Image: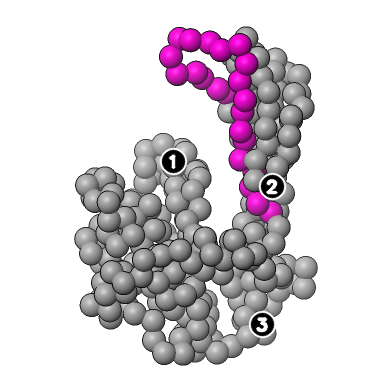
Amino acid sequence: PKLVRAPSQISDKDLQSAPLVLTAVPLGRHIFKIRLKLLGNHLAANYLLLVPKLRTSNGQARYKSHKVTLRCAGKILDAAADYTSFLLFNARGDQVADLVLEHEFVNQRVRVQSKEGKFEASEVVPVPELDEMERVSCLSCSSGRIRSVLQALGLERKSGERDIAYAMRLGRALRNGYAYDTAATEADLSNLTTSIWEKRRGDCSAFNAGFVFALRAFDIPARVSLGFKYGSAVQEACGAIVAPHAQAEFF
């Protein structure tokens, strides 16, 4: 079975020229509880746990809030340090079997809409401001090869084409004549940035890496976001309620 994504409700004309806004509407509160298991039989005296945080500010609209809690036999352990992208915890080796890591977050439905559309002012997401380091990392790309591949497919960026219009055109192209195939990606890992365009087959890593580097090649900041996808649709498509997943973000 395929995971079906609803088509865009914005016309090509509006994508190219109309004033647009990004909106986000809360959908649901989720709690993941994870137990830890060590590889091997050797137990160290102490461990450091680096727990990634979901970004909820500066235009990161996919999640409204995120709270991380580490419990040991029901008792909450305080974080040793709280950084921008992760929390750092100290745990004794004899505590590992009793640790439960809890992620609590609210996810949101994110949409690009015409500024003349129907939405509440509170739903509008401010335009993110990338700092110099983020912009450089989101544009890092050896563009020569991927530009040539895209040009051969008629998918190069047109003169004057708006960032979002080009991104939507690439996304639509990937929905027609391209197939999900994990084995194809594993066999072509060294060419991940162009594999999906050349082979027309690949997993979510290939689809999103190809999409992101195509955007970068034409000066649109973009990055791959790695994580997990879950739900009944995932179970139907993958046979498990939770599966690793990659998605793309562009600015």
Labels 2 and 1: the sequence-earlier one: 2
**Lateral position of residue 81 relative to residue 112, left or right:** right
Q: Between marks 2 and 1, how big is the CA–CA gap?
A: 26 Å
**Lateral position of residue 67 relative to residue 183, left or right:** right
Residue segment shown in magenta: 35-56
- Residue 85 placed where, x, y %? 64, 45
Q: Which residue is mark 2?
A: 84
- Residue 220 placed where, x, y %? 49, 73
Q: Which residue is mark 1?
A: 243
Residue appearing at x 59%, y 88% in the figure: 18
Q: Secondary structure at mark 2?
A: loop
**Lateral position of residue 184 relative to residue 130, left or right:** left
Under mark 3, the amino acid is Lys
Residue appearing at x 38%, y 53% in the figure: 204
Q: Between marks 1 and 3, how big is the CA–CA gap?
A: 36 Å
Within the magenta stretch, is there residue 250? no
Q: Nearer the viewer, residue 215 or 173?
A: 215
User: Callout 3: 10 Å neighbours few (<14), some, many (20+)?
Assistant: few
The answer to whether residue 145 is above or below residue 91 is below
Q: Which residue is mark 3?
A: 115
Residue appearing at x 51%, y 87% in the figure: 16
Q: Secondary structure at mark 3?
A: loop
The answer to whether residue 99 is above or below residue 112 is above
